[in-house]
Amino acid sequence: MSEEHFDVIIVGCGAAGIAAGLDLQSSSISSFTILEARDRIGGRAYTKKLDNVPIDLGASWIHNFDPNNALYKHMQCESLVDSVFPNDTVYYDYDGSQISVIVLEQSEEICEKLFDLVDEHRDKVLKEKEKDLSIAEVIEHAYNRELEGKSSQIKRTVDLILSEVEQYEASSLNQLSAACYQNNNAEDMSEKYVQNGYGTVLEKLGANLPVRLNTNVTYIDASNSQLIKICTNNSPNIVYHCKYLLITIPLGCLKNNTIEFCPPLPEWKLASIKQMGYGLMNKIILQFSSNFWGNEGKYINRTSNLIRGEFCFIFNLSKQYELPNENCNILALYVHGEFAYMLEKLTDDEIIEYAMQVLRRMYGTEIPKPLKYLITRW
């Protein structure tokens, strides 16, 4: 069995691991390495080609693109696409009929009232030390009151707008802290897409870092604080040693105890890991032989008459990336929160059929089946 020694080892080569590695390089610390379980770097920034069309399976947007953004200086040489929400979004009811401006405005007014209550609650928590509640708990009574006597279409549209909040946060309203929620108006932010894919940016940033791929850390022995021992299941004949260790693996891995620690992590850390939550967003990418949905908008938002968040956000990638070739008849269906968890229990074929049922209700029963697809299960 061989041993390898470093001053610093970083576990995980997603955005946090890459940032840490770049900091070490800039500090002239050369004795370090990054151990990454996947066969690639970038974590949830992952771009995959579908017939030469770059598809972001993870991170897509660059929010608040200005000099204060940590990625700003790294993006100056990238081809960026503006992502403008209000003028490029079309709203449909679940059956494919377009939602009128009047219904949309009435629904937005109701939602503004609901989120005024969220703002008031946040102030009470911060100033009067009231107990925090979820957004769902704060708005529940007002939601029922405001929708009393309203049409079913207005109710569906209100749910759609509430789903926009859930989609932005990748979680459900009953899991989102009302006190910590800050309503960011997309009109006031600079939103960008990377033309060649967000994942390519992370690949470039990490290209010159000392990374060991397919190296899954399973055991960390820190009983000797001067010499930390690390074992992996991919390289059983190699034991890594370091003076300092930085762990940047996903929270879900920590919750599922994918790494055994010796001694065990202290109770306060375990409690923090247990208490912290995280969202879930998945994407269903469908490529078709023809564009049957038209080019009205980059964003197609639809209501559901069954489940809030049911395939409510459809992205017209051919228009988003302004890609003209015949391979670009691509729709990306974003799913989040409880609906995303539900879909992860289904097979690929079941998910595709479910999505196609929704699209047939909107565009007719004669639309073609997808030629190819990609489904994420983050």
Image (tube, rainbow, N blue to C red):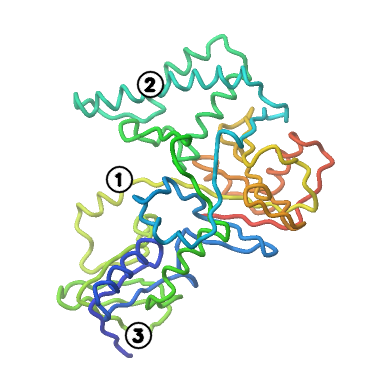
Task: Say what secondary structure mark 1 lies in.
Answer: helix
Task: Say what secondary structure mark 2 lies in.
Answer: helix
Q: Where is mark 3, residue-wise?
A: 238
N-terminal of the two: label 2 or label 3?
2
The crowd level at tag 1 (other Cα within 10 Å; few <14, some 14-19, many 20+) is few
Q: Amino acid at mark 3?
A: Ile
**Relative depth, front residue between 73 and 304:** 73
Residue 86: x percent and y percent?
56, 33
Task: Say what secondary structure mark 3 lies in.
Answer: strand
Residue depth check, mark 2 versus mark 3: number of the one nearer the observer: 2
Residue at position x 29%, y 52% in the image: 273
Q: Where is mark 1, residue-wise?
A: 275
Q: Are marks 3 and 1 in contact (CB under 8 Å)?
A: no
Q: Amino acid at mark 2?
A: Asp
Is 50 placed left or right of 258 in the picture?
Answer: right
Q: Where is mark 2, residue-wise?
A: 116
Is 221 placed left or right of 142 in the picture?
Answer: left
View extreme (right): residue:
366
Q: Amino acid at mark 1?
A: Gln
Is 61 placed left or right of 31 in the picture?
Answer: right
Q: How many marks?
A: 3
Rendered image: mark on residue 342: none
Q: How many angstroms separate mark 1 from mark 2 (CA)? A: 27 Å
Q: How many angstroms separate mark 3 from mark 1 (CA)? A: 35 Å
The crowd level at tag 3 (other Cα within 10 Å; few <14, some 14-19, many 20+) is some
N-terminal of the two: label 1 or label 2?
2
